[in-house]
Image (cartoon, rainbow, N blue to C red):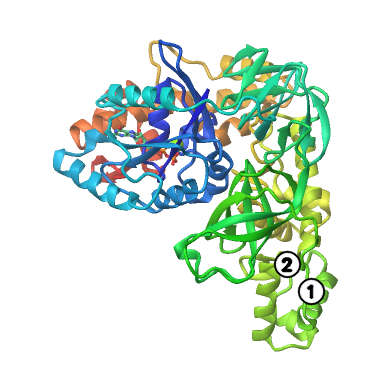
């Protein structure tokens, strides 16, 4: 099997394309579905009648979720570079391409989406502009397909082209040792821990003993699934779900590798690195970086004999803060620690260096004294003025030193207002918070996670400090913050069967009037009297994830709102404007419900009110 991946700017139609190709919505989170935005990797299975098949990895386009895109990017062999015909290339089109240039893509198809929104001239223009962008990248000269997932135009041609590209790709090395970077970890009741990922090379069999890296734990594979189908054996290039019953979900996270025992772990290895042109002014002899290897993001240092001054491959040494499993030839990319500009990428070399480099070369005396001041403050954030006074340095100089400490990872920079904390203190707080959060996920899997108030209380730390420190980890993708709750990366709350039954029975759908909500009072009194465990928390989860939507004093199911939204968008595209009366007719409810609902759509940024009529918000 081979892996197809999407890439491209936010909202350009990547997920819609995957859905049109496979029938599967890769946005598996309710929040993604309601917001219409991909937050994390999505997966789908593409099948042809003649047995040709592929796994699809759909990535988020929003730059805030670039770390999630990076976790899925290494597995891609065929790239669907998605560019909306009505917008042309945008920043993440370029950024995704720059990243993929370093990885394992062997064939690119350019897909111009939203064909229905442009005329022939505009399409020609978009294609020309995109071709310009592709010059000098892996996608130069890629065949282009203009499609509309709304009308289906161009989809047959694209499907056929993907088929041919899949057939033409050589198989991944099935005899090589198995190497599977883990991108999801979850518990399946009755089975224990499941890990998923793209098998980069080799073969996995049920009963095989493999090693989790870098933790070096041996695990036996109890069962294997590929897109829901049980398999005895899977080969390189497959999307695999492996059941590892002996390991607890908390003990594994995205970024670990399930690998044959041949793979050792290293903290330091030679690399061949090619800088991005835009990174040349930023690169020095020694660079603090975030390295992306497989599905992992690891902080480290990339060092050269001399700072690269040209866009051409140079050798260097990558030293990581934690060990990683890698193999010669493994592709990687690096970003700057802060701000997170993409610096370049390359491949891991064969020769593993064992000697220590002087990465942790002694801090100079001023850095030492500033760091000592930070350390003495513990988790309390230090502002430059205070630190300067205690370190007996000028404020400007102190600020520069603090920034240098941030860059090398010894301190963390907090926002609003700018302040600094010692990295070990911050890491300690983060580790304790994560363990509390994981505990909450285990005990109440239907809950979104923990609030800052709950964390502050358990950690006996001021809430504002908890919020500001954890924000830096959220920023790095090491923690998630959604709707007021902190959660472990990749965690998705799951209601119990009992809870689901309760809400299905309480938020009733009337098949005759599918868009009529129930009064909030009905739900709230049912919640007060029910014996179903965790019902109130489950309700909050449903609200936060869009499973239920409270509009004024009524409650809708998320599917109802999505249905109304599709109708409203469809009608507005055709008719341009809409009155309240038209809206009411469209969804068949009374004024009592229609008015607040349409106002909710205004507030949600879907429609715009203009006097008595609504129009669709552009873009
Ligand atoms: N008119 C039209 N709209 C489309 C088409 N394809 C997608 N859209 C719309 O474009 C919007 C964004 O589509 P998505 O598929 O979610 O975009 P995406 O690239 O996956 O977005 P992110 O994952 O957030 O980066 C949605 O409202 C889609 O309905 C198309 O062919 N024609
Ligand atoms: Mg998407």
Location of residue 212 in the rendering, given as x and y in whole percent from the top left corner: 77, 34
| Labels 2 & 1 near each other (Cβ < 8 A) | yes
Which of the 4 image quarters holds residue 567?
top left
Q: Is residue 365 above or below residue 66?
A: below
Q: Which mark is residue 503?
A: none
| Secondary structure type for disc 2 | strand
Report whether 202 appears left or right of 432.
Answer: left
Question: Which quadrant of the rendered structure holds the C terminus?
Answer: top left
The answer to whether the residue bearing label 2 lies less than 8 angstroms from the nearest atom of ligand 1 is: no
* Residue 557 to residue 550: above or below: above
Label 1: which residue?
A: 371
Picture layout, residue 307 above or below residue 65: below
Q: Residue at x 61, y 44 (%)?
A: 329
**For the residue labelled by badge 1, is the local secondary structure a helix, a strand or a loop?**
helix
Q: Which mark is residue 411?
A: 2
Residue 557 visible from this viewpoint: no
Considering depth in this image, is 412 or 604 the residue closer to the camera?
412
Q: Residue at x 77, y 65 (%)?
A: 357
């Amino acid at each position: 099997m081979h892996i197809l991946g999407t890439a491209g700017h936010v909202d350009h139609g990547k997920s819609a394309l995957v859905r049109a190709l496979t029938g599967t919505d890769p946005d598996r989170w309710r929040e993604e579905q309601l917001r219409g935005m991909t937050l994390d990797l999505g997966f789908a299975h593409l099948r042809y009648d003649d047995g040709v098949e592929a796994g699809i990895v759909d990535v988020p386009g929003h730059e805030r979720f670039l770390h999630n895109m990076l976790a899925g990017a290494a597995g891609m062999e065929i790239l669907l570079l998605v560019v909306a015909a009505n917008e042309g290339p945008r920043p993440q089109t370029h950024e995704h391409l720059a990243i993929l240039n370093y990885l394992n893509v062997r064939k690119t198809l350019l897909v111009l989406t939203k064909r229905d929104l442009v005329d022939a001239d505009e399409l020609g223009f978009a294609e020309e502009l995109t071709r310009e962008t592709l010059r000098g990248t892996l996608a130069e000269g890629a065949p282009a397909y203009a499609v509309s997932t709304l009308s289906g135009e161009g989809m047959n041609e694209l499907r056929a082209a993907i088929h041919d590209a899949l057939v033409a790709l050589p198989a991944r090395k099935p005899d090589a040792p198995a190497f599977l970077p883990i991108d999801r970890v979850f518990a399946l009741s009755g089975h224990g821990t499941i890990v998923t990922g793209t098998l980069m090379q080799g073969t996995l069999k049920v009963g095989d003993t493999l090693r989790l890296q870098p933790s070096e734990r041996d695990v036996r594979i109890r069962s294997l699934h590929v897109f829901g189908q049980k398999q005895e054996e899977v080969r390189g290039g497959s999307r695999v779900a492996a059941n590892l019953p002996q390991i607890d979900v908390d003990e594994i996270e995205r970024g670990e590798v399930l690998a044959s025992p041949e793979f050792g772990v290293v903290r330091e290895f030679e690399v061949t690195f090619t800088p991005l042109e835009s990174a040349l002014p930023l690169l020095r002899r020694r660079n603090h970086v975030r390295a992306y290897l497989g599905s992992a993001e690891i902080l480290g240092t990339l060092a050269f004999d001399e700072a690269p001054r040209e866009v051409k491959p140079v050798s260097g040494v990558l030293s990581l803060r934690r060990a990683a499993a890698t193999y010669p030839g493994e592709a990687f990319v690096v970003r700057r620690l802060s701000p997170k500009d993409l610096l370049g990428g390359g491949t891991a070399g064969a020769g593993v260096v064992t000697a220590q480099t002087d990465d942790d070369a002694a801090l100079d005396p001023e850095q030492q004294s500033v760091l000592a001041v930070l350390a003495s403050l513990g988790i309390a954030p230090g502002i430059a003025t205070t630190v300067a006074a205690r370190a007996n340095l000028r404020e400007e100089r102190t600020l520069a030193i603090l920034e240098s400490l941030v860059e090398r990872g010894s301190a963390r920079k907090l926002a609003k207002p700018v302040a600094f904390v010692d990295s070990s203190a911050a890491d300690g707080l983060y580790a304790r918070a994560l363990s509390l959060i994981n505990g909450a996920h285990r005990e109440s899997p239907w809950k979104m996670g923990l609030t800052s108030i709950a964390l502050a209380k358990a950690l006996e730390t001021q809430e504002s400090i908890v919020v500001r420190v954890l924000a830096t980890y959220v920023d790095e993708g090491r923690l998630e913050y959604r709707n007021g709750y902190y959660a472990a990366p990749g965690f998705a709350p799951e209601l119990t069967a009992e809870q689901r039954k309760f809400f299905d029975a309480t938020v009733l759908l009337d098949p005759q009037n599918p868009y009529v909500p129930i009064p909030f009072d009905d739900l709230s009194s049912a919640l007060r009297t029910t014996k179903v465990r965790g019902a109130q928390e489950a309700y909050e989860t449903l609200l936060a994830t869009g499973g239920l939507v409270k509009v004024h004093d009524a409650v809708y199911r998320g599917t109802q709102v999505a249905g109304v939204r599709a109708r409203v968008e469809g009608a507005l595209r055709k008719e341009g404007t809409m009155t309240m009366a038209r809206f009411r007719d469209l969804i068949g409810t009374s004024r009592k419900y229609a008015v607040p609902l349409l106002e909710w759509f205004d507030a949600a940024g879907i429609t715009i009110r203009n006097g008595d009529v609504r129009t669709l918000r552009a873009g």
